[in-house]
Amino acid sequence: METDLRALAKVQKWYGPHSSTAAAWPVDTLNRAKGNTTVSVVLPAHNEESTVGDIVTAIRRDLVERAPLVDEVLVVDSRSTDATAERARETGARVVAQDEVLPHLPPLAGKGEALWKGLAASHGDVVVFVDADLRSFGAHYVSGLLGPLLTDPGIQFVKAAYERPYTGEDGVVRRGAGGRVTELVARPLLNMFWPELAGFAQPLGGEYAARRQALERVPFVTEYGVEFGLLVDLLQLVGLDAMAQVDLGHRTHTHQPIDALGRMAGQIMQTAWSRLERQGRVLAPASPAHTLLQFGLEGRADLVDVAVAERPPLASLVLEEDMA
Ligand SMILES: O=c1ccn([C@@H]2O[C@H](COP(=O)(O)OP(=O)(O)O)[C@@H](O)[C@H]2O)c(=O)[nH]1
Ligand SMILES: O=C(O)[C@@H](COP(=O)(O)O)O[C@H]1O[C@H](CO)[C@@H](O)[C@H](O)[C@H]1O
């Protein structure tokens, strides 16, 4: 108990100085602070033709053309079967196909793979990740996340906070009801095992920014384990005082059905287990099963696999290639 109270005291001390709002970071201030630092915005996109174009348009209009804050807008086409790549390209993004980045490596799947490939294919000193399914995006999402990074050399990683409404199939918006896996799985797990991270209001949110140097020194969990894995691994790498949080207001996005979130929850639990083992905090004769038997309507039952893999820190690949 003592450890937990000490960790929570650390969070309370951390929270004030490391939390801000997007309004605290006006673009002209950031342009002056940016200096020679280059910025890439990377959007992982699987079948996001209906939303990716508006997001790219807003970034380019407000943060490339009007104010040169962003140097690169990269969309990672994550095995889309719709017109995601076309919409992204015609609105001015550079587009790479996930499986065509580092093609000599065996391809892996999911969002974490898309983000790792986006890191590999981008060039900015600072990388901002933004989901491509957002319906509430504004340029302040990017400028807010960049604020602490462009003004404080001690900050390595910035995570978005926001209110997350849930819009049901009936079109009714329910305030604070979004982030279902966050509330039911990620937040309890983090408070149980990594209470120093308890101050992050939206640990699974898809909008965050970090220095390339830090991102290239941590592994990327594939599928939907990536956000959980990055938080835990970056805490270990850079420490809580090098992490910050910016409130971007509210976030609406395309919601997945509950069975998809069940699989996401499984992937996040697998990720948490892997970090507990890696940090020597659990000793188990066998790893947990990674199959999940899900039950649908009309007696449907589907056995799915919620295993996750992980990509090594990019820096380790470059080192290997240099040595080779
Ligand atoms: O294999 C995948 C799965 C997801 N995504 C993208 O990652 C972001 C978040 O995924 P999703 O919206 O499915 O997750 P949710 O926000 O519903 O948790 C979106 O831009 C997806 O298009 C991706 O690039 N590859
Ligand atoms: O936060 C969550 O619980 C999930 C699901 O959100 P909703 O319940 O559909 O609002 O959404 C996030 O989780 C994924 C896994 O980390 C991230 O990849 C997504 O970007 C994020 O939207």
Image (cartoon, rainbow, N blue to C red):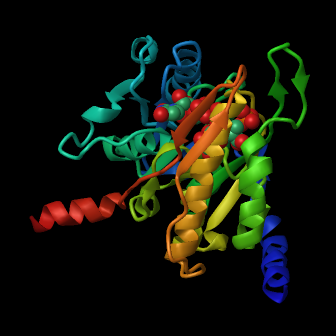
Q: Quadrant of the N terminus?
A: bottom right
Q: Position of residue 105 (x, y in %)?
A: 22, 47
Residue 3, horizontal then vertical, whole percent: 78, 86
Residue 76 shows in the view: yes
Residue 299 at x, y percent in the picture: 69, 25
Q: Residue at x 55, y 58 (%)?
A: 271
Q: In this picture, is 208 found above or below 51?
A: below
Ligand 2 shows up in which quadrant of the image? top right
Q: Quadrant of residue 75?
A: top left
* Residue at (55, 77) in percent of width and height: 284
Residue that lies at the very extreme toward the bottom in this rendered image: 2
Q: Is residue 193 left or right of residue 97?
A: right
Relative depth, front residue between 62 and 199: 199
Q: Quadrant of residue 92?
A: top left
Picture coordinates of residue 188, whole percent (x, y): 78, 60
Q: Which residue is pictured at 45% across the width and 48% down the height?
A: 222
Q: Residue furthest front?
A: 299
Assign the C terminus to one quadrant of the image.
bottom left
